[in-house]
Image (cartoon, grey):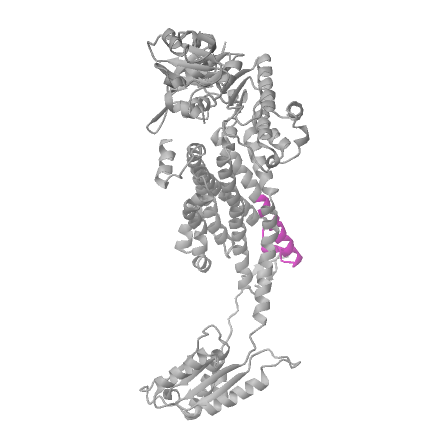
Amino acid sequence: MNTIEIEGVSKTFGNVTAVDDLSLCVPQGSVYGFIGPNGAGKTTTIRMVMRIFHPDCGQIRVFGEGHSETATDRIGYLPEERGLYKKMKVNEILKFYAKLKGLRSPQEEIDEWLERMNLSEWKNKKVETLSKGMSQKLQFIAAVVSKPELVILDEPFSGLDPVNTEVIREAVLNLKRQGTTVIFSTHDMNVAEMMCDYIFMIFKGKKVLDGTLEEIQSSYSSDSIRLRMEGNSLDLNSIPDVERIADFGHYQEIRLRDGANPQNFLADIVPKTNIQRFELTRPSLEDIFIRIAGPAAEELEHV
Amino acid sequence: MYKVFVVANREFQSQVKSKAFIISLILMPVLMVASIGIQKMAGDSVDIKDRKIVLIDHTEKLAKKIETAVNQRNQNTTRDKDGKQIKPEFHLEIVKPSDNPTEQGFELSNRVRNKELNGFVELSEGIIDPANGKRAATIRYFSNSPTDREFPRWLDATINRIVQTDRFEKANLPRAEVLKAMKKIPLDDLGLLSKNDQGEIVEAEKTNRAVAFILPFGLMMILFMGVMVGSTPLLQAIIEEKMQRIAEVLLGSVSPFQLMLGKILGVTAVSMSMIGLYLGGGIYVLHYFDMSDMIAPGQIAWLLAFAALSIFMFGSIFCAIGASCSEIKDAQSLMTPVMIILMLPMFFLSVIIRAPSGTLATVLSFIPPATPTIMILRMNIPPGIPLWQPIVGIFGVLAFTAFSVYAASRVFRVGILMQGKPPKLTEMLGWVFRG
């Protein structure tokens, strides 16, 4: 059973094609990660699922239904940019959002979630008095308080400290355990690798990756080198055939030019440094992302 | 529909609880009463500083008489019974006409500029002796304070009285007799005679023109304020929702049409509460002064119906504008044409009051955006208008409101998620027709 089925969907704005002939199935109860550089079409796809935008062509079925209003009541949505009325009190705004999802008396759920997110004492404070992290948690509660069967989270972790990230992460996994389908978009490939059952990448409006992490990685050969050296004295850029270096501090992930032989690379560096680890591996999700999205995205990734 | 009410309720609560609303609710009547009071007070207190005037008399006969009149006035009318000065004294300086009148005029003008004088007067020869119309009869008052009418008004009346007396004498007519013959007869404005419950014919009452005007004007103003009081906060709220990206969260739960409808309903509730409060206050005041028969329940019902529709109509337009703009500043230029339509009845106010059933007033009252205000105005000016007119009018307004809500929802849908520079009017029309 699929929660979302997207078939041949396109959406253009003026002469910009935001989403181009996209097909995607999100199985019920899965955690689906949407990745892709800024402006790739993630938010447009999400907005189409939310029925905020209508596709120019193709079909989107949510819970097996075509276009129906009752479906949106079963979806919780955390948009990329947070939208909260600054002058409203925490409890009031949660009540308002829950009622908009059709809940008549949501107070019990609200109290429960405030407790879980450590926001109980802020219940009667105005939104404008909350810190950024607290507003983020509040927005998260607003998205899930109506017990939706599908939760769509656009960048849920951006701007959160590690403690709050963990709180939200745990909440998301808890939703999954209860059978909720979760879609979230992220720029953090580590989070995507860690949390998602499936990963979907969109680039320039087109689907470029879709599947489990293993499936995606298995489509790439073991052409990445994980290298750990004593000290960091060697300038790897000076070695021939090196195309890209990702520095993880303790180790470097190196990609060679197409057709280059890793053995030659090894032979080149052996005389110059003490090697502690040399491993030929499949590329990480981050590396795959950058291979697809190219240098433009690489800049964005390291902002 | 439940969601529409949830949106409406939040809009209502947030506006009614805002300080701006409470302040404007209290302040508006206070300001109105205060402005009337201040004007009355200011009207009573005149500038009692002495007026120094130079008189150049080419007739060589009037100066003496004017001087006498000035002295009499200074003695008799400048103080009240308790000796408190209530009017300024005039001090006349009589100057002989010079051979070079231009030079003399310039010198005197300089004295006025230096504040030695308030002004100077030149009486032409023709006043006493027009020489069969060959000489001009003019009183020329020179000053740099044209709004100070205290002296010129007195002088005008005084000279004319003196000259009249002079003319009567020359024509050998007794002044008192002539004035008696010319005495004006007043005209009384009356209503119509009617029968009371006992079948007796009741005398017509004198109509008070001011009161007859205040009711229709007051009702129209209440309607106008009702639209204004809700619309501006509505516009601000929508721009805030758009800029704070709240709109996107809302659109994840409600359709753009539901969102807009909810907001308009909310603002209608706000405005109608205000209208209700003012109207209630007004009726209480009328009741207090035993004038409650001035306004009939039917009139109130029509006012409420037109007010609700008017707020709905303009509310939808303000929603569309708010959704299209990212800043209040951008909204202002789009607001201008709407404000002109809203103010239209004000521009034609005097025409409509003078001829409420004239062609212009009738035609204007059937143009939907202007219908509510003008129809209310026309209905409440005696003798009123045939019943079919407001009925047709209200259907026109209903149709136009339906259209404006539809058109606005199309603009709202596109605009609310759009960022960046506001669209042109032509683009907005494109959204209405193409979606």
Direction from residue B366 to residue B232 in the image, left or right? right
Rendered location of residue A302, percent (x, y): 45, 25
Q: Residue at x 65, y 22 (%)?
A: A116
Chief secondary structure of the magenta span?
A: helix
Whether B211 is drawn above or below B138: the answer is above
Tell me if residue B237 comes above or below residue A155 in the rendering. Answer: below
Q: Position of residue A221 (x, y in %)?
A: 39, 7
Q: Residue at x 56, y 74 (%)?
A: B46
Say whether residue B128 is visible.
yes
Q: Residue furthest right?
A: A121
**Within the image, what quadrant is residue B324 found in?**
top left
Q: Which residues are magenta?
A: B272-296
Would residue A21 be seen by someone viewing this image from the given angle? Answer: no
Q: Residue furthest left?
A: B134
Q: Nearer the viewer, residue A250 or B200?
A: A250
Please give the name of the residue rendered at 65% of the width and 55% of the height, measured from the top-left corner.
Answer: B287
Given residues B286 and A285, the one toward you in this image is: A285
Q: Is residue B279 magenta?
A: yes
In the image, residue A230 sits, relative to residue B110, either above or below, namely above
Q: x and y percent of residue A247 in the render?
A: 46, 19
